[in-house]
């Protein structure tokens, strides 16, 4: 009877992340590859945040969403990649119990937030392209803040709910997670010695709620955008708009598609390796390509970057060669 009174009777104090342990010869090449991806991801996302903050011309709803996305992507990469890189470099695969679930909590929060944030961004683009005359009225700074806040609060709610359910489970072995970060959802029935039915059902419902509706909203927004693009008389303008929308839609489809494949497909040991590869798309690839696709190809962002670089160079030149030295009057 005493065991029923203590719902969180934990005996496991650490977990072992297998990561890419079945590829020992590729450890160093994978480490170098992921280090490069991490550096590019952080540099690109932090650059976009800095530009949006510094340039008042970018203080618009669209760039407000992009700033939120860049912050989220840099946070997500810093949550997942350092653990993976440390394991690849040192071969150390052990992570403490608390660290594991803190990582899972942050990842679940960011994942839920991104699902809705991407749909909010697609809705913003729909209003800008399909209702340009009413865009300033429909999408003002207050509404954009509210939509971003809803995305962040939704992610926080889903991660908090899952962690609360996990806190009622007992973990008494095995303590091996066949992943490169602490995603306990696929292996929860093997990790816990409690009944995990309630947690697995909750995780499945949350996955459906946080992937299917946002994906359908995003898809419908881009379909409406494409229909509007087809009405553009200029062939050059139509091709340019199609190029931008197709790249956006490709990234969104990769993110939502791989997320649904990993969490909605039946749990099977035969699919574990495939799911591990699919998960690289939404944990490693999209944080790197999102700033390149959404922002750095944008003319306004390029212009802002060029202006900031020119300003920096002019300041550097003035510091290196002070003009006051040459402004001496000869009597």
Image: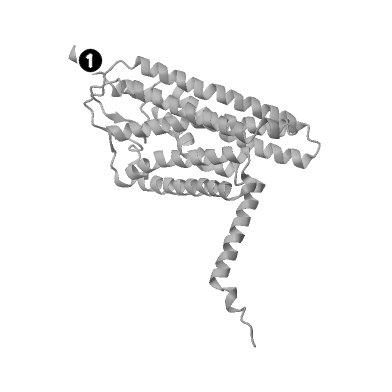
Front-most of 99 and 62?
62
> Which residue appears farthest toward the left when viewing the image?
2
- Using residue 195 as the reference point, say whether residue 73 is left or right of it: right
Q: Which residue bears the numbered disc 1? A: 5
> Would you identify the image quadrant in which residue 276 lies?
top left
Q: Please provide percent x and percent y for residue 305.
A: 60, 53
- Decide if residue 177 is in sight here: yes
> Which residue appears farthest toward the right when viewing the image?
233
> Would you identify the image quadrant in which residue 139 lies?
top right
Q: Which secondary structure, mark 1?
A: helix
Image quarter in which the C terminus is found: bottom right
- Which color mode does the image show? one colour
- Using residue 107 as the reference point, say whether residue 236 is left or right of it: right
> Which residue appears farthest toward the top when viewing the image?
1
- Using residue 286 as the reference point, say whether residue 274 is left or right of it: left
Image quarter in which the N terminus is found: top left
Going 42% across and 21% down the picture, which residue do you hit?
A: 203
- Decide if residue 266 is in sight here: no
How many numbered circles are shown? 1
Q: Residues within 10 Å of mark 1 (few under 14, many from 20)?
A: few
> Which residue appears farthest toward the bottom when viewing the image?
331
Q: Please provide percent x and percent y for residue 99.
A: 31, 35
Q: Where 217 falls versus 52 (above or below)?
A: above
Q: Please provide percent x and percent y for residue 262.
A: 45, 26
Front-most of 127 and 38?
127
Q: Please provide percent x and percent y for residue 146.
A: 56, 30
């Amino acid at each position: 009877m005493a065991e029923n009174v203590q719902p969180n009777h934990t005996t496991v104090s650490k977990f072992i992340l297998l990561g890419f342990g079945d590829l020992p010869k590729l450890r160093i090449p994978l480490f170098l590859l992921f280090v490069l991806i991490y550096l590019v991801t952080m540099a690109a996302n932090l650059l976009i945040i800095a530009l949006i903050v510094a340039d008042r011309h970018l203080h618009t709803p669209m760039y407000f969403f992009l700033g939120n996305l860049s912050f989220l992507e840099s946070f997500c990469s810093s949550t997942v990649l350092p653990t993976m890189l440390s394991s690849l470099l040192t071969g150390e695969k052990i992570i403490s119990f608390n660290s594991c679930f803190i990582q899972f909590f942050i990842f679940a929060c960011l994942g839920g937030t991104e699902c809705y944030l991407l749909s909010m961004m697609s809705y913003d683009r729909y209003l800008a392209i399909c209702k340009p005359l009413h865009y300033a009225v429909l999408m003002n700074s207050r509404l954009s803040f509210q939509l971003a806040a809803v995305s962040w609060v939704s992610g926080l709610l889903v991660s908090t709910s899952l962690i609360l359910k996990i806190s009622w489970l007992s973990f008494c072995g095995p303590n091996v997670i066949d992943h490169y970060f602490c995603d306990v959802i696929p292996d929860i029935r093997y990790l816990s010695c409690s009944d995990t039915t309630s947690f697995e059902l909750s995780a499945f419902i949350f996955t459906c709620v946080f992937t299917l509706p946002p994906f359908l909203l995003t898809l419908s927004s881009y379909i409406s955008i494409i229909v509007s693009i087809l009405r553009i008389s200029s062939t050059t303008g139509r091709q340019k708009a199609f190029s931008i929308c197709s790249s956006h839609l490709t990234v969104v489809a990769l993110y939502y598609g791989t997320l649904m494949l990993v969490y909605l497909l039946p749990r099977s040991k035969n699919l574990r390796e495939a799911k591990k590869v699919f998960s690289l798309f939404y944990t490693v690839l999209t944080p790197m390509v999102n700033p390149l696709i959404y922002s750095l190809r944008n003319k306004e962002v390029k212009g802002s970057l060029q202006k900031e670089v020119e300003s920096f160079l002019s300041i550097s030149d003035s510091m290196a060669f002070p003009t006051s030295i040459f402004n001496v009057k000869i009597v």
